[in-house]
Image (cartoon, rainbow, N blue to C red):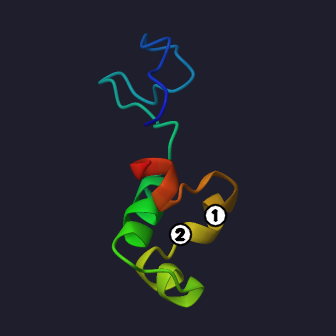
Amino acid sequence: MGEYPHDLTADGPQVISEVGIVIPTTPWESLWNGIAEWFGVTSENDLKTILPNRAEFENILWGAADLFN
């Protein structure tokens, strides 16, 4: 659901160590926001409770329709 890194060398922009740890392009909260909505969690307060970092990524959150339609 994210983008595959174009450069996996040690100097690549998403690689943060010599052992190949890669920073993802899509936050975990983005995906889980849509899954939570699909399970019926629709209240803002409930979504904030189960995804406490959700506010950090509000501009790139997916909804159930984005994932399952």
The residue beneath circle 1 is: 56
Secondary structure of residue under mark 2: loop
Task: Please tell me the numbered disc located at residue 17.
Answer: none
Which residue in the structure is indicated by mark 2?
A: 53
Give x and y (percent) for residue 8. Answer: 42, 14
Crowd tier of the residue under label 2, counting other residues whose Cα lies within 10 Å: few below 14, some 14–19, many 20 or above: few
Asked whether the residues under the numbered discs 1 and 2 touch, taking CB atoms below 8 Å apart as contact, a structural biologist would say: yes
Mark 1 nearby-residue class (10 Å; few <14, some 14–19, many ≥20)? few
Q: Is residue 1 above or below residue 29?
A: above
Instruction: Give the side of residue 63 with respect to residue 37, left or right.
Output: right
Q: Residue, x 46% and y 37% (percent of image)?
A: 24
Q: In the rendered image, which quarter contains the N terminus?
A: top left
User: Residue sitting at 43 percent across and 54 percent down?
Assistant: 31
User: Which residue corresponds to the image point at 46% horizontal and 30% vertical from the top-left?
Assistant: 16
Q: Is residue 19 above or below residue 2?
A: above
Measured in 3D between alpha carbons, the distance from the residue under mark 1 to the one under mark 2, in whole angstroms, is 6 Å
In the displayed orientation, state which residue is furthest to the left.
Answer: 19
Q: Amino acid at mark 2?
A: Asn
- The residue located at (63%, 70%) in the rendering is 55
